[in-house]
Image (tube, grey):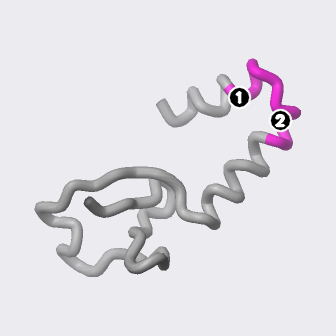
Amino acid sequence: MIRQCCQCKKIAVDGHWVYPRFNQLAGQEISHGYCDRCFSKVKRQIRSQHCGVAAIRRFISRFF
């Protein structure tokens, strides 16, 4: 199974996040999450909204 960042679309290969090569994802099972860089950005955005429950729900609702 391949891990892919849901923001920048990089994939995890041997502990590093890289952009996939042409046809590298074809026929593969993909699990989505965040790479280290995108996770830091998302975490800062959530904290900047004062971590209120309503603010977190608004932020998450943009993605679902």
Name the residue beneath numbered marker 1. 56
Q: As drawn, is 34 to the left or to the right of 37?
A: left
Q: Give the residue displayed 40% in from the left and 79% down from the top.
A: 14
**Mark closest to the chain's N terminus, 2 or 1:** 2
Q: Give the residue displayed 75% in from the left and 19% down from the top.
A: 54
Q: As drawn, is 17 to the left or to the right of 42?
A: left
Q: Amino acid at mark 2?
A: Gln
What secondary structure is the magenta-colored segment mainly? helix
Q: Are marks 2 and 1 in contact (CB under 8 Å)?
A: yes
Q: Position of residue 9 (x, y in %)?
A: 42, 63
Q: Give the residue displayed 70% in from the left and 58% down from the top.
A: 40
Q: Give the residue displayed 66% in from the left and 23% down from the top.
A: 57
The image shows residue 41, relative to residue 26, as above or below, that is: above
* Mark carried by residue 40: none
Q: As drawn, is 10 to the left or to the right of 38?
A: left
Residue range in magenta is: 47-56
* Mark carried by residue 49: 2
Q: Position of residue 31 (x, y in %)?
A: 34, 52
Q: Amino acid at mark 1?
A: Ile
The image shows residue 40, relative to residue 23, as above or below, that is: above
Residue 1, picture quadrant: bottom left
Q: Position of residue 22 (x, y in %)?
A: 23, 78
